[in-house]
């Protein structure tokens, strides 16, 4: 397993984005850690999906785009209050070490500036203003702006007859800020109304965060399964760092937060020396533990996750069905990673009906990579296009076409529309969000309506830190 893990890293190094802003006079080589982004558990900067089938994400030449949908995650951010506090505690423990630090932690004694300078930045999107490096290429602000330009380049024609249109966002401040930066970067030509959808459970099914409304949802329901995964790699990390620095006494828990330090510091500074503390095998073990935890809490490994995701999947299917009758051809939504994961679990793109094992890292048979699906700034596009009087559907996840394996014989490995509807009906069969989540106990909103009634209701929920 160790050898297989090592083999995986160089492969991804080739697949990861390559861009460098290194400067010979001493600026950091920002691109030096980009090959590690797929191993940061979705906490580090955005990257394109590492495995490609070689299919262009552009609509096939003989076809015409009829509708485009986007389900996007907020951009790069600071850690949450809970995670940030834990990372801060580990930093204080190391920085207060009574002796000079040796080995891979020695950089902390070398004019190091810890990336959390203001705890008011917890939960916040990273921007040029709150970044510690003025040329940090990985801010959430810049990611959203770049995404908007890429969107216009590929789908701008879809907006020719719709210069005024909505963008839907949850009322989490970082999600809203991402949507706002995206909207403004489309340019003055467009009049965008941000429809701010409440995350509160009182929203019931009429939300982008359906797990929050689900009173029966228990993300630790499968803790008995995930708890079997070996954390020996964390013990090894702590033991190695303690051996280099006698008396430091780092724990396995401390080692976990060092990975978060690596990822979030990259968001804030553009690089992190903490990333050099780990071996390739340790990154592979950490990434798989994150896959495992997410799979059994928000993904296909938890049946209620599919139910929660079915609300947004069903709404997506309805928009596709009504495409000819709807004036708007572009539907853009912004939310959190776990909501997108649940949505994808309902769609089934990364569900091979093979439960993730806890006794080893499945190198060859492993399609569920949480950080590949939902890195910071994740974008999941649903394309509806017409070719020779027939209509087709396909998905593009983080710049890469991900075919529906059982239905991919259309142009560009798409799924013919009637077959797609059969596929969707089968995936949604038996999914009853209202009953399964006891929605009526907290809300009278038993269906998702905001895509259809935003003009009359003008959603404008107050922003929250979530």
Image: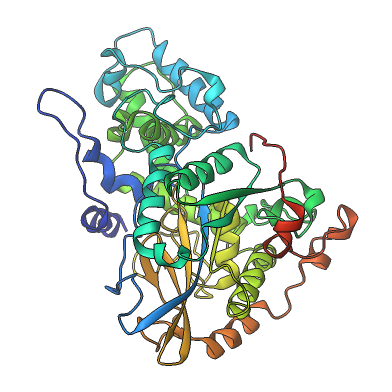
Residue at (50, 66) in percent of width and height: 161
Residue at (39, 28) in percent of width and height: 128
Residue lying furthest bottom: 389
Q: In the displayed structure, does residue 43 sit left or right of residue 340?
A: left
Q: Nearer the viewer, residue 313 or 370?
A: 313
Residue lying furthest right: 441
Query: In which quadrant is the N terminus drawn?
Result: bottom left
Q: Is residue 14 above or below residue 233?
A: below
Relative image position of residue 226 (x, y in whole percent): 57, 54
Q: Is residue 17 above or below residue 273?
A: below
Q: Nearer the viewer, residue 219 or 25?
A: 25
Relative image position of residue 37 (x, y in whole percent): 34, 46
Relative image position of residue 338 (x, y in whole percent): 58, 53
Q: Nearer the viewer, residue 331 or 317?
A: 331
Relative image position of residue 54 (x, y in whole percent): 27, 73
Q: Is residue 362 above or below residue 67?
A: above
Q: Is residue 125 above or below residue 441?
A: above
Q: Nearer the viewer, residue 296 or 179?
A: 179
Query: Is residue 40 something that shows in the picture?
Result: no
| Snapshot colouring | rainbow
Query: Is residue 101 something that shows in the picture?
Result: yes
Residue lying furthest left: 24
Residue at (40, 58) in percent of width and height: 151
Q: In the displayed structure, does residue 125 sit left or right of residue 62?
A: right
Query: In which quadrant is the C terminus drawn?
Result: top right
Number of residue marks: 0
């Amino acid at each position: 397993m160790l050898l297989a893990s090592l083999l995986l890293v160089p492969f991804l190094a080739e697949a990861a984005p390559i861009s460098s802003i290194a400067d010979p006079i001493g600026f950091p080589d920002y691109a030096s850690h980009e090959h590690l982004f797929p191993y940061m558990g979705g906490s580090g900067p955005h990257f394109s999906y590492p495995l490609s089938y070689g299919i262009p994400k552009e609509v096939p030449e003989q076809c015409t785009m009829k509708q485009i949908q986007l389900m996007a995650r907020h951009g790069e951010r600071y850690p949450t209050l809970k995670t940030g506090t834990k990372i801060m505690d580990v930093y204080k423990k190391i920085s207060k070490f009574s002796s000079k630090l040796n080995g891979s932690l020695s950089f902390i004694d070398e004019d190091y500036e810890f990336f959390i300078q203001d705890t008011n930045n917890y939960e916040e999107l990273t921007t040029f203003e709150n970044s510690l490096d003025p040329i940090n290429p990985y801010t959430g602000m810049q990611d959203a702006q770049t995404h908007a330009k890429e969107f216009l380049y590929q789908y701008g024609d879809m907006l020719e007859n719709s210069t005024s249109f909505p963008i839907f966002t949850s009322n989490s401040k970082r999600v809203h800020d991402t949507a706002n930066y995206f909207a403004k970067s489309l340019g003055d030509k467009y009049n965008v109304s941000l429809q701010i959808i409440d995350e509160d459970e009182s929203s019931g099914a009429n939300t982008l965060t359906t797990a929050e409304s689900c009173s029966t949802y228990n993300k630790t329901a499968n803790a008995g399964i995930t708890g079997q995964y070996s954390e020996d790699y964390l013990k090894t990390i702590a033991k190695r760092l303690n051996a280099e620095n006698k008396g430091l006494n780092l724990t396995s828990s401390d080692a976990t937060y060092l990975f978060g330090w690596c990822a979030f510091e990259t968001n804030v500074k553009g690089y992190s020396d903490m990333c050099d503390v780990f071996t390739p095998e340790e990154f592979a073990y950490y990434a798989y533990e994150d896959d495992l935890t997410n799979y059994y809490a928000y993904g296909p490994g938890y049946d209620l996750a599919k139910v929660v995701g079915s609300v947004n999947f069903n709404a997506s299917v309805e928009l596709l069905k009504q495409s000819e009758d709807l004036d708007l051809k572009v539907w853009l939504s912004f939310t959190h990673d776990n909501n997108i994961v649940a949505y994808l679990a309902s769609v089934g793109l990364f569900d091979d009906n093979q439960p993730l094992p806890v006794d080893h890292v499945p190198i060859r048979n492993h399609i569920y990579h949480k950080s590949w699906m939902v890195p910071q700034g994740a974008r999941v596009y649903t394309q509806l296009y017409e070719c020779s009087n027939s209509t087709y559907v396909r998905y593009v996840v983080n710049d890469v076409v991900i075919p529906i394996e059982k239905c991919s014989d259309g142009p560009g490995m798409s799924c013919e529309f009637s077959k797609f509807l059969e596929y969707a009906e089968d995936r949604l069969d038996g999914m009853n969000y209202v009953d399964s989540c006891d929605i009526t106990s907290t809300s009278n909103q038993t269906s998702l309506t905001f895509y259809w009634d935003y003009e009359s209701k003008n959603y404008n929920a107050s922003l929250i830190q979530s």
